[in-house]
Amino acid sequence: MQFEETSIVRRKKRKRQVDPMADGFSNAVTKLGETLEKMANKLSRVAGLITLADNRKLVEVVPDDIKNMWNEWGPRGLILISLASQIILSQLGLVRKHSPRTRIRMALWCAYLLANFIASAALGVITRSALDVCNASLPNSQDHKPNTNELISFWAPFLLIHLGGPDTITAFALEDNELWLRHFVELLFQSGVALYILLLSWPGCSDLPLLSILVYVVGFIKCFERVQALRLANTENLRDSMLGPADPGPNYPKFLERIHLKKSQGFHVNVEEVPEPPLQANDHQYPRGRGEVSAAYILFQTFKRLFVDLILTFEDRDNSQSYFLHLQPDEAFHAVEIELGFAYDMLYTKATVVYTFSGLVLRFISVFLVLMLPVSFFFMCGRAKYQVIDVVITYLLIGTLIFMEIFAFITMLRSDWTDYWLSQHDHTRTILVFPFLKRPTKQWWSRSIAQLDLLSVALEEKPASFLQTQKFFGVDKVRVKHRYKTYSKVSDKLQDLIYSQFRDSIDGNSDPKTLCTHKGSFSLRKNECDALLWSISKVEFDQSILIWNIATALCYYSEMEDTDEVEIDIHRAESKHISDYLLYLLVSHPVMLPIGIGMIRYRDTCAEAMRFFKEKGPITGKTEASRKLLEVDCSQVSPSKVKGDRCKSALFEGCILASTLKKMERERMWKVVSQVWIEILAYAATHCRGFHHEQQLRKGGEFLTHVWLLMAHLGITEQFQVSQGHARARIIVS
């Protein structure tokens, strides 16, 4: 009994020791459960609030303040941005005709895209305002801002005018002309939206809907002019308009029937070909002296077929050649640049629509309606019931529209199309009433050529300094392409050299088309430089450009101090200009040159030159770099044997050519170099398609395009494939 009592006492003591731990654990579990229960209750309350609350402010991403601000200021901001884009388009659209600057093209591109996007977005926003106007006119409506929304609806037809665009630009690139049908559908849809807004605002109490009709008619005319200009500038339509009627030629089956009839009658029949008498070249159709614009317009009407890859006849060649042979070099290039001005207007502006009888009628209607707007708005519409900011924006819209119409009218009077019309109708004195409208000097193109110096790139004279953001968006690659690009003016001496060499090819006994087929070998053979033919005949065209560019640069910089004689300076300086220009085309516009791997050769050449200059230590300038390269003895082993075919560098081939050229008499050397470069330039010009020449007109014009058109006028082109008229066969009966 005593033993059992003792064990019971021990169990009770152990129980007393364990209970405090168990109690603490149980209390903690209880508290945790209570906490979780409280959290669950709170979450359920929040969920209940989210699902059952009437106002949705707790789940809205965009606050009501921002929504209200957008509804109130969104249409106004879009209208102002659209106005700014129209002003930029009207001004820069005229400037890019004679400016090659990249910044101008980028600003114009942004304004061109922004004008369409903003106008479309603004029409969508204004549609909601027009619906508010329509709802405000209902009896139970509680909207207290119908007047403001009504004035905003009045802005919709102005956006239609903005979609029509200014006269100075219809297409940013030729691809816009090809997509004219897409532009037509878009403008047709936007016109329907503007008409829908007009109908929605019609129940208003003011005369604004009536006034909107005037603006809508002007906007419809502008859109029609733009679509028509895009359609006419389309390549297919251009080609169809220039083809003319088909020419079946003499009736061959009928001629055979006559022969068969004579033979059946027992006669002995012979057929003799009668040569067609040559036609006298008629250059009297091209006015001279002060009629340069008229002559250029007549020439353009014939030679615009080159832009769409059509052929010309021997009559076109003879007439044009006879006219240009009487011109001085500066006059010949001036006639060409006026022609290209007409080509730019045809492809990128509304000129083909505006400078017609129907176009002038539509223009007078639109100007008359525009001039009625400020007077009508001032007297017909009560301005006191509208907000001041909306009235100011409305006057700004009307004022900008009037300003742009005045600017378009002045541009029309200054254009070559007007000069030609006045010369044809003997109304030259009419324009003298407004002498301030005619500019004393007019610029048709940039009169500059881009330059790219390979030694400058290899010496890294302009180190790169890019921000991280530029590298992220890839802007650094674009900037590298333009970092070493410079511009040089096209001098009269360069025009004289080119024109003189073209004249010599026509006056000589050789075929004028020699310049179209040879890449410089003709000039080398003529000057008895057969030892240099390997640099032209045995290499690809892009490789010959690099070889001669390197050789020209080495000869040019290695004799910087010896340039005393004027005649030598002309050939030396202009050879360098043509050399750097063709290298720029090889790198930046390879599509304008015959197909090749010019970019790969250029990169490999630059890489090898950079490595060479780094190994030779610090080099201070191009003169020292040229002398270092000329010190390399390349006579023992050919570079191709050491480098193989994988590397396409042409650096030391150019050094070999430069060493050979420097052994010649200095004056003779530079004359040969200049003639070779002009022949290479002519070969590149004739082997570039008309489509690529058209594309460069929107970038200020390329000098290669001027050379190409001048060669065509002189008959130095392969597109004169009609050498004579119809054959005349005569039946001789015996």
Image (spheres, helix red, strand yellow):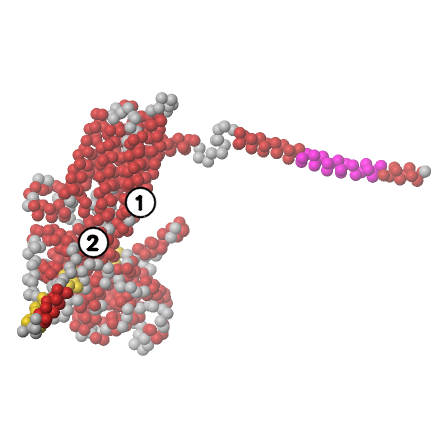
Instruction: Decide which of tag 1 and tag 2 comes sooner along the chain.
Output: 1
User: 218 or 454, which is in the foreground?
Assistant: 218
> Given the image, on which type of amino acid does mark 1 rest?
Leu
Where is residue 593 shown, x and y percent of the image? 26, 62
Reading the image, the residue beneath label 1 is 113
Disc 1 vs disc 2: Cβ atoms closer than 8 Å? no
- Kindly give the residue lying farthest to the front in the view shown: 265
> Given the image, on which type of amino acid does mark 2 rest?
Asp
**Number of numbered tags placed on the structure image:** 2
Q: Quadrant of residue 280?
A: bottom left
Q: Which residues are magenta?
A: 12-33
Give neighbour class at mark 1: few <14, some 14-19, many 20+ (Cα, 10 Å). Answer: few
Q: Magenta stretch: dominant SS?
A: helix
Where is residue 90 shown, x and y percent of the image? 23, 42
Q: Within the magenta stretch, is there residue 260?
A: no
Reading the image, the residue beneath label 2 is 240
Quadrant for the C terminus, please.
bottom left
Where is residue 16 shown, x and y percent of the image? 81, 36
Q: Secondary structure at mark 1?
A: helix
Q: Quadrant of residue 184?
A: top left
The reply to whether residue 498 is visible in this rendering is: no
Q: CA distance from mark 1 to mark 2?
A: 30 Å
The reply to whether residue 427 is visible in this rendering is: yes
Q: Residue at position x 28%, y 59% from top?
A: 591
- Kindly give the residue lying farthest to the left in the view shown: 734
Q: Is residue 415 left or right of residue 114?
A: left
Q: Secondary structure at mark 2?
A: helix
Q: Residue at position x 21%, y 25% from top?
A: 379
User: 265 or 210, which is in the foreground?
Assistant: 265
Q: Residue at position x 34%, y 65% from top?
A: 604
User: 475 or 345, which is in the foreground?
Assistant: 345
